[in-house]
Image: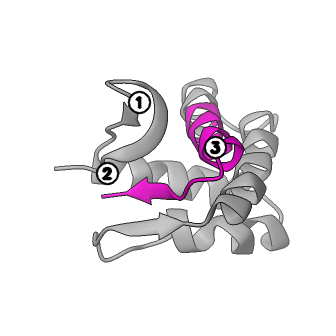
């Protein structure tokens, strides 16, 4: 099982990571980010019930910036940094289109 996340660059404009991948990415993000940045993205990457949700485009833009900082952090493992960048791109795509970033 996993998520289907809008505005990605693969699979018909979607990203389809497993719940476990999101959980591990969230742990890496929490480790490398300052508390204020983590608080900005924790509603998306923290523990979730698994229910669908939408991120407004203006919030998606802020999340994209935080994910890019995390992806470039010297303590972020390269493969998880690549995934963080993929999410940043999807969030930015939603923001640029002025559409909600959808997770289902």
Looking at the image, is mark 1 or mark 2 nearer the viewer? Answer: 1
User: Which residue, given by chain and number where applicable, does mark 2 sit on?
Assistant: 20
Q: Is residue 16 above or below residue 23?
A: above
Where residue 97 is drawn, which disc sits there? 3
Question: Which quarter of the figure has residue 77?
Answer: top right
Disc 2 to disc 3: CB gap under 8 Å: no
User: Which residue, given by chain and number where applicable, does mark 1 sit on?
Assistant: 13
Give whichever of 101, 64 is nearer the camera.
101
Q: How is the image coloured?
A: one colour
Q: How many numbered discs?
A: 3
Q: Residue at x 81, y 34 (%)?
A: 74
Q: How far across and how far down the image is residue 4, in percent?
A: 31, 46
Q: Residue at x 77, y 52 (%)?
A: 66
Q: Which comes sooner in the sequence, label 1 or label 3?
A: 1
Q: How far across and how far down the image is residue 93, in percent?
A: 62, 38
Looking at the image, is mark 1 or mark 3 nearer the viewer? Answer: 3
In what element is the residue under mark 1?
loop
In what element is the residue under mark 2?
helix
Asked if residue 46 lies left or right of residue 104, the reply is: right
Residue 98 among magenta residues? yes
Q: How far across and how far down the image is residue 95, in percent?
A: 68, 49
The magenta-colored residue range is 85-104
Residue 80 among magenta residues? no
Q: Which comes sooner in the sequence, label 1 or label 2?
A: 1
Q: Which comes sooner in the sequence, label 2 or label 3?
A: 2
């Amino acid at each position: 099982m996993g998520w289907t996340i809008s505005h990605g660059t693969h699979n018909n404009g979607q990203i389809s990571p497993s719940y476990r991948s999101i959980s591990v990415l969230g742990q890496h993000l929490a480790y490398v980010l300052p508390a204020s940045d983590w608080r900005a993205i924790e509603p998306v990457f923290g523990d979730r019930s698994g229910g669908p949700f939408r991120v407004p485009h203006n919030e998606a833009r802020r999340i994209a910036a935080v994910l890019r900082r995390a992806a470039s952090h010297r303590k972020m493992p390269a493969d998880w940094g690549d995934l963080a960048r993929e999410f940043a791109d999807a969030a930015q795509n939603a923001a640029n289109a002025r559409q909600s970033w959808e997770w289902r």
